[in-house]
Image (spheres, grey):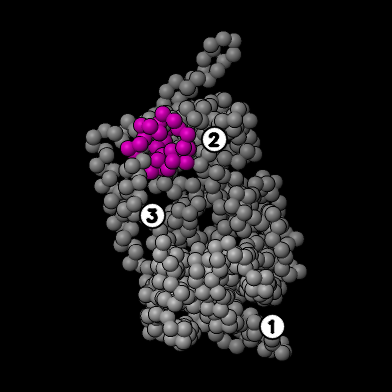
Amino acid sequence: MKKRSEQGRALFYSRDSGGRHEATPPEYVRWAERRAAELGLQFDGTPEAIQEMIQSGESVRGDIFFDFSVPGNILSRKGLDALRSTAKTDLKVSHIFSPKRNRLARPDNATDGINLENDLRKLGITLVFMDRSLEPLKPRQRMPIGELVMAAIDYDRSAEDRRELAQKIIYAHIRLAKDAYSTGGQPPYGFRRWLVNESGEALRELEKGEIVRRQGHHVVWLPSDDAEWTTIHRILELLKTNSAHGVAKILTSEGIPTPNHGRYRTDNGVPHTTNGRWNQTTIINIARNPLLVGVMSYGRRAMGDQLRATPNGPRELTDSDLNEHSNSPKVVRNSNENLIEAQAKFEPRVDPIERQALIDELDRRGGTQRGKPRSRNPAQNPLGVRLFDMTCGWPMYRIPYKGSFRYRCGLYSQSCGGQCHHNHVDGVVATKFALNCVRQKLLSPTVMPKLEKRLRELSERNDQSDRNAPLLAKKQRELSELQDLREKSVENMGRAKNDAQYNALAKRFDQLEEQIASIESAIKKLEDELHSSPVGEDEVAMVMAAVHQLSELAGKADNLELARQIFQLTNLRMFMRFRPTRPKKRVINKLVGGVVTFGDAASPVEIYEGATAHKEVRSGAKASDPLRRSDFSDGENKSLRNVSRGDTI
Ligand SMILES: [Zn+2]
């Protein structure tokens, strides 16, 4: 067996939020060069090289491994992953240089950082930080207790830094919120960002994403004077006599631009442009926006992975802040008592009494589902939103049944049996049947080559979007630079000696927040483009292989997730026809036929488009809606039914 060299090649690793700033990484490399020479090691890194890497967004060049704009608590990063694999495979590597522990990792759990170090040391590698060196460990050797304690303290401190930062940001936000200043982000529909001076005088409207750095100035949201307010008043009026869904339909049919027309959004990880259609959530959010009556409210949505805001300051995350399945932090909707409210810097635009009446009415109409996310596990629901009852045009919903599942008419369920019949099919049988249809369709001699061609086209489009990568890297560096400045500015706020100093710093913080928001949205857009066609050469091969295996799969239907993906890929939809029969005494609705469509084929019946909420259906809200979804086949239809409640308004 070849032995690892004891005095061979040195690698350098650092992580930077990009900014602090482009002067430091070259300094670090200079340090590594010096140390390598002292220790008699080979090392090809130069300050110029890392400078170029920063410019181009590369994470590996020769002996330099570098990650930009990756939060330290994420332990899988491009540069770090490459470093680990090089360290493992190249036995000449004897040393790894990293300036400080917190450049290597800033884990949420100190043990993660320690394990990372130990993995490297057990390869026979010496870790060299600026303030200490750690000798290799024998495969079964335990870390000396002194080192262990030091490491735990170091990494724990790094984690503590993140908490402290989160805490400071929350306090800064609360302070701004209590003064009715913007804490960053996009203003709601009908409002614009305005620059105000210390005495609260509105100076001028800010452009989208525009940043102004001026002492003693803040950003507030003020009503715009344009068509948006005509629409807002219209919405409030229409809502008195129409459901939110009905109002949305009216506005859509009139072609009135939606609040986020021209923007991108993502649903279940699928990015898409907004489709110009109003939805009921948007309508409700506009109607419920407290800014209409001059109340600025903060903290409706709680997010963040360290701490979350309450009017009294930060609080710890609880179970309800975590995703059930992945245990990762999720955005939650706060109840009213957790909001910070302040009198906005303008007169109410809507009569508060009238608005309260409307809100009461909206509550009465059944806002009980508001803000409650639907639980979903797509893998268990291969035919979700793909199966329809031809009798009523409603989608059939998955329901658990005797350890397996069924699809049952949605109208039947939601009207408590009042408006349709107990039409149902066995979930597994339906999945098998659908897979067989796909197989029949795909195995025809003409379809296979077409499919492959289409996938290759998608794959090429993907290559093209890769060209965005350097621009994205640049933006990400700018972002981390700003985030560092923000970090700095929060630190400074803690040190402010008097109110004036503090106000100036808070101002600066506000501006940074604005800048960060605008860069984040630019990055988001670039990333969306990058990921918009996630089909690479490998995927083409994989999908083709999967298609070839379909005959086998169709017999089993045990891989529901793969089945779901195949249905999504082909945009399969099944329309089921039921007829009452009386085999014995009881009348049973039997499946007697149906239609299967693929791609963007038109549906054979009008698909129900209206409200699906229990109450609305039961109270006999209009049950049929002839509006056919034109974009049904684009594979992104989830956003229509699984609306993200309480999103941008
Ligand atoms: Zn039905």
Query: Is residue 567 magenta-colored?
Result: yes
The Cα atoms of the two marked residues, 3 and 2, are separated by 29 Å
The image quadrant of residue 147 is: bottom right
Residue matched to label 1: 494
Residue depicted at x 30% and y 62%: 464
Q: Any atom of ligand 1 within 8 Å of the CB at mark 3?
A: no
Q: Which residues are magenta?
A: 547-575
Residue 155 location in percent, x, y?
63, 72
Residue 225 visible in the picture = no
Q: Of the residues under marks 3 and 1, which one precedes in the sequence? A: 1
Identity of the amino acid at label 2? Answer: Tyr
Query: Looking at the picture, does residue 284 appear above or below residue 96?
Result: above
Residue depicted at x 41% and y 85%: 47
Which of the image's four quarters has the N terminus? bottom left
From this viewpoint, which residue is outermost toward the front? 1
Residue matched to label 3: 534
Between 607 and 495, which is closer to the camera in this rendering?
495
Q: Element type at marker 1?
A: helix
